[in-house]
Amino acid sequence: MSALQGGWATMRSSARDVRARWKNPRGINVAFHRGALVVGALALLLVTLLVALYLDGALTLAARRLPGEVRAVFVQITKLGDSLYIFVLSALGIVIPLLMRAKPGASRAYESALAFLAARCFYVFTVAAVSGIVSQVLKRIIGRARPRMYDQFGEFHFVIPGFPSVYASFPSGHAITAFACAVALGYFLPRLRWALLTLAVLVAISRVVVGAHYASDVIAGAAIGWLSAVLVRRAFATRGIAFKLAGGHILVKAAGKIAPALAGKSGKPAA
């Protein structure tokens, strides 16, 4: 069997394993405080409403008055919230490690590390996909006009369904993607967690600065992105993909062990 054939066989085997795990979730004993979730959602709704009522218009006008140099910087920052490159990179992070598992002479520890790496990328891809779908559905249902139409209609102009994109302001898709991916990657890169979240905040701010969204749009987007990462992690943990359940907590599988295993400096990563 050629290396390519072996790689595709490995990918098919991994896909079957994921399907089997997805059909048979395990019970989860991690506390899931539905009451706290409801209270949090209501608090978020209240904050979003207050910002929409009292700050959206003022911040939109203030953003227009910023110096051109500042706006130019945020035009570049806002590109980091584009979900396309997240999908491409995470998809490559799934496919390439699985193909590499078929490398002749590869140790079991090396193959195991590649499998864990692919599982992590699969989680990031799923978070981006789920949060992106939620974003598009809400945008079309709510149909809020973007700030470019503020002068004609003010900040509370809606056309349902939200087509074309000028009526897809709420929530901010870039903010959703930025926070979803920041939280998701933060689970695997805890030392970079605050840097990732800071970057997500800058992306969210950039959407207001460039006039693409109101402040309330990005607040809601940030919350949706964060929650998407949390709920998808829970779903993955119940199936033993990328995460595991231990002592009432959700833990990352093979934490801190993938890079050493790939470098041949340690044994098989722990499950």
Image (cartoon, helix red, strand yellow):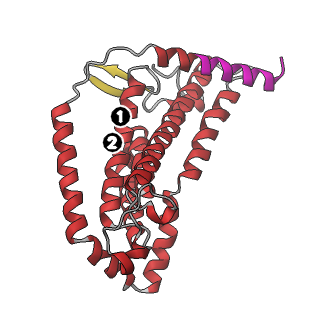
Q: Secondary structure at mark 1?
A: helix
Q: Locate residue 234 relative to residue 58 in the image: left or right.
A: right
Locate residue 143: give its quadrant: bottom left
The magenta segment is: 1-16
Asked if labels 1 and 2 touch by Cβ distance under 8 angstroms, the answer is yes
**Residue at mark 2:** 227
Specify the amino acid type for callout 1: Leu
The percent position of residue 48, horizontal first and vertical second, equals: 24, 58
**Residue at mark 1:** 231
- Rendered position, 228 above or below 9: below
Residue 252 in sight: no
- Rendered position, 123 above or below 178: above
Badge 1 crowding class, 10 Å Cα cut-off, few under 14, some 14 to 19, many 20 or more, is few
Query: Residue 182 lies in magenta, yes or no?
Result: no
Question: Which residue: 57% across, 41% down?
Answer: 90
The percent position of residue 258, horizontal first and vertical second, equals: 52, 31
Q: Secondary structure at mark 2?
A: helix
Q: Locate residue 227 relative to residue 164 in the image: left or right.
A: left
Screen quadrant of the N terminus: top right
